[in-house]
Image (cartoon, helix red, strand yellow):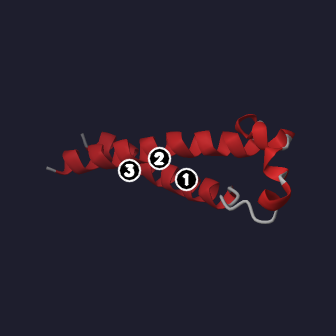
Amino acid sequence: MAALRTALTIIFIIVSIVLAAIVLMQEGKSAGLGAISGAAESYWGKNKGRSMEGALVKITRWLTVAFLVIAIVLDIKRF
């Protein structure tokens, strides 16, 4: 049981570091002056889900779920 807890703790630390790095790599949600000129409705604005930014959002969601699940499992194992 101690080996499982140690493995989960190591995975938890790795997920935490990667999640923080990916959040810092993302762009801000404010459109800035691009919204005034309509640049947000360009080809890149419409296909944002297929871009690198879209991939970062998907990875962030999965890592957040993993972070929460591992945190709950580690807390349950404590008792």
* Residue at image point 77% right, 38% down: 46
From the viewer's perspective, is 21 left or right of 16? right
Determine which residue is flagged by label 1. 19
The residue located at (21%, 45%) in the rendering is 77
Q: Residue 70: percent from the left, percent from the top? A: 36, 44
Q: Which mark is residue 73?
A: none
In which image quadrant can residue 5 be found? top left
Counting from the top left corner in percent of width and height, residue 22 is at: 63, 53
Question: Which quadrant holds residue 50?
Answer: top right
- Among the two numbered marks 3 and 1 on one chain, the one whose residue lies closer to the N terminus: 3
Question: Could you classify mark 2 by the number of other residues whose Cα lies within 10 Å: few (under 14), some (14-19), or many (20 or more)?
Answer: some
**Crowding near pointer 3: few (<14 within 10 Å), some, many (20+)?**
some
Above or below 46: residue 30:
below
Tag 3 secondary structure: helix
Amino acid type of the residue tagged 3 in the rendering = Thr
x%, y% of residue 69? 35, 42
Mark 3, residue position: 9
Q: Which residue is mark 2?
A: 64
